[in-house]
Amino acid sequence: MIPVFSLLNTIYLKKRPFFLNHKINIKCDCHCKICDTWRIEEKPDKLLSNSEIKSMLTRAASLGTYGYWCWGGEPLLREDTPDILAHSHKLGIFNMLSTNCSKLKDRYDELLPYTDIFSVSMDGIGRTHDKTRGYPGLFDKVVEGIEILRRNKGRVRIFYVVNSMNADEIEDAVKLAKELKVSINAYPIMRFAGWNEELMLDREKEREIFSKLLSLQKQGYPVVTVRKYLKIIRDGKQTKCLFPRYFVYVDWDGEIYNCSCGRLMNPLGNIRNIDLEKLYESEDYKRKVKELEQCNRCRTPAGELGGAGSLFRQFPERYFYHLKHEKIHLLK
Ligand SMILES: C[S@@+](CC[C@H](N)C(=O)[O-])C[C@H]1O[C@@H](n2cnc3c(N)ncnc32)[C@H](O)[C@@H]1O
Ligand code: SF4
Ligand code: SF4
């Protein structure tokens, strides 16, 4: 089927998630202040194996999954990440890979052929980034990694988690993204209870920073965060969350959740013993997707989907922004 029809079929006729979010591992070499994933121990017997992940991807593709968002932990610390992305690519899936860039220079050439977009984390300029990530020298690695990818025609988007440590550097980060010829997606930090509360922005600061982002976007800087979402955050409004409608999230140990804030939810089961189609068709699953529309526990770009009302309304904006700033089509 032509990709666009297949995508519409998945989303609107079958009403199934079109993106599979997957933590390919949980191991991490940073000591981030925004995220406490690095504190979790990866147990080899629990980690999904190469063949289990490939079977999951094959099944997901047969159900019309359009995209695979591979993250972690730090996915570049897993030896077979390129092999898994190659499998997904062969199935015709659009691959997005998140990385902190610690190993990007060493491994980019293994990943480049199978990665449709690199989502690169940058949480401030220079020492702010290094401090936020607890990794001296990481900012330089991020910039170097982006330059290498761009020289090799890789598509790159910076993910900037706005928090009290880096809020005042947002304009510099947006200008740097333009210099590096990549786009930037900026969104507010999600609260991890007991870990990052002191990094939340207060209402006034949030209004100031998201107004600035709107203005930079209007001036033509490569801010690809959806405009309507930027306005919702600026104004402190509620979002309608359609994340569970569009995404399914599989954790490193195979536990399946409706959203990437898995820790806030109960798992729906484990990919090792549940068939995805049966799960999607179950009344319980459909009911949860509907219920979670009202969930406002986080305001990551997950809420962006709901905030913007519908994928359709967002589509022209997203498509033309990506076309302009990343120079590549959204659909293959
Ligand atoms: C969990 S990381 C995994 C991939 C890789 N280790 C990295 O840092 O890019 C995926 C994305 O989540 C973002 N993230 C981490 N903690 C967050 C938080 N508290 N709120 C919002 N986004 C967060 C990261 O900045 C990164 O872009
Ligand atoms: S944001 Fe990425 S690099 Fe930082 S602790 Fe979480 S998984 Fe590790
Ligand atoms: S708002 Fe709720 S359902 Fe939506 S992504 Fe956040 S935690 Fe998940």
Image (tube, grey):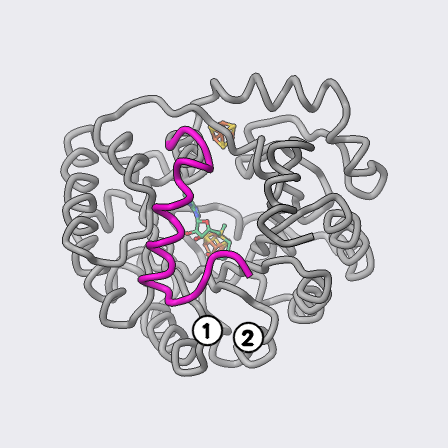
Q: Which residues are magenta?
A: 308-332
Q: Main secondary structure of the magenta part?
A: helix
Q: CA distance from mark 1 to mark 2?
A: 7 Å
The residue located at (50%, 21%) in the rendering is 293
Which amino acid type is shown beneath numbered disc 2? Leu
Rendered position, 80 above or below 236: below
Rendered position, 70 above or below 243: below
Quadrant containing the C terminus in the rendered view: bottom right
Element under label 2? helix
- Asked whether 154 falls inside the magenta stretch, the response is no
Element under label 1? loop
Mark seen at residue 154:
1
Image spot of residue 72 (x, y percent): 57, 54
Mark 2 lies on residue: 112
- Locate residue 303: give its quadrant: top left
Image spot of residue 254 (x, y percent): 73, 44
The residue located at (24%, 33%) in the rendering is 231
Image spot of residue 54 (x, y percent): 78, 58
In this view of the protein, which residue sits in the foreground, 54 or 262?
A: 54
Image spot of residue 71 (x, y percent): 56, 55
The residue located at (38%, 30%) in the rendering is 307
Rendered position, 193 above or below 85: above
The residue located at (30%, 70%) in the rendering is 181
Q: Identify the mark nearer the N-term, 1 or 2.
A: 2
Crowding around mark 2 (Cα neighbors within 10 Å: few <14, some 14 to 19, many 20+) is some
Mark seen at residue 26:
none
CB-based contact (under 8 Å), mark 1 and mark 2: yes
